[in-house]
Amino acid sequence: MSADVLFDAERNITLLGDSRIVFHCHHYNLFLQRTIDDALGADAAEVQRAAAAESARRLLGALLGPSGKEPVRARLERAAALFGKLGFGLADITALDADGGRVRLVTSHYALGWREKWGPTADPVCHFAAGFWASALGVSAGLSPERLLVRETSCAAVTEQGSCEIQVE
């Protein structure tokens, strides 16, 4: 299945493989995230990571197919290309392999948007990215979602450094 984003003008929809997708700007995504944060408080980050992981697992599972047909590295690279193509940022995955590791978000849709819109925050905000990378590793290496632990260890929305780091175990 192709990982190309295609616009079907006849039906006025955007497709990625067999899935319909919708693009939203950082304004929409950040207001949605902040609304969830306000409603759920301390539980919001985990709920958002889990929801992101589930949606990414379904999408990546369909696009990458069953694990074992190509090297994990190639599958992770395809996931990184898709992450960027969808506008979520540039991901450096050189420190990520089948055993886990680190993803450095050279640019992050959420962190940069948050900092621009509301200024620095006390807590990391790249919950979608964390969930996406947990699923990218799971789908690429054939690991069950419950075997993966993901956390954002550094966020550009918190610090003035320009990148974020996500640890996947």
Image (tube, rainbow, N blue to C red):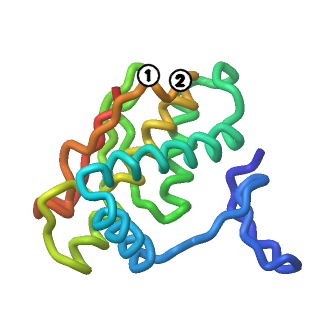
Q: Report which residue position mark 2 lands on.
A: 144
Quadrant assignment, res 90: bottom left
Label 2 near label 1: C-beta < 8 Å?
yes
Secondary structure type for disc 1: helix
Q: Amino acid at mark 2?
A: Ser
Residue at screen point 56% across, 33% down? 74
Q: Amino acid at mark 1?
A: Arg
Residue closer to the observer: 82 or 126: 126
Residue closer to the observer: 126 or 83: 126
Q: Is residue 108 left or right of residue 116?
A: right
Residue closer to the observer: 123 or 156: 123
Residue at screen point 64% across, 24% down? 67
Residue at screen point 48% across, 65% down? 87
Q: Assign the N terminus to one quadrant of the image.
A: top right
Mark 1 crowd level (few <14, some 14–19, many ≥20, 10 Å Cα): few
Mark 2 crowd level (few <14, some 14–19, many ≥20, 10 Å Cα): few
14 in relation to 95, above or below: below
What x and y, as percent, mark residue 130? 37, 45
Q: Report which residue position mark 1 lands on.
A: 147
Q: Which mark is residue 7?
A: none
Q: Is residue 126 left or right of residue 142?
A: left
Residue closer to the observer: 64 or 149: 149
What x and y, as percent, mark residue 110? 34, 64
Residue at screen point 65% across, 19% down? 68
Quadrant assignment, res 152: top left
65 in relation to 55, above or below: above
Quadrant assignment, res 13: bottom right
Alpha carbon separation for disc pair 1 and 2: 6 Å
Secondary structure type for disc 2: loop
Q: Is residue 79 left or right of residue 49?
A: right
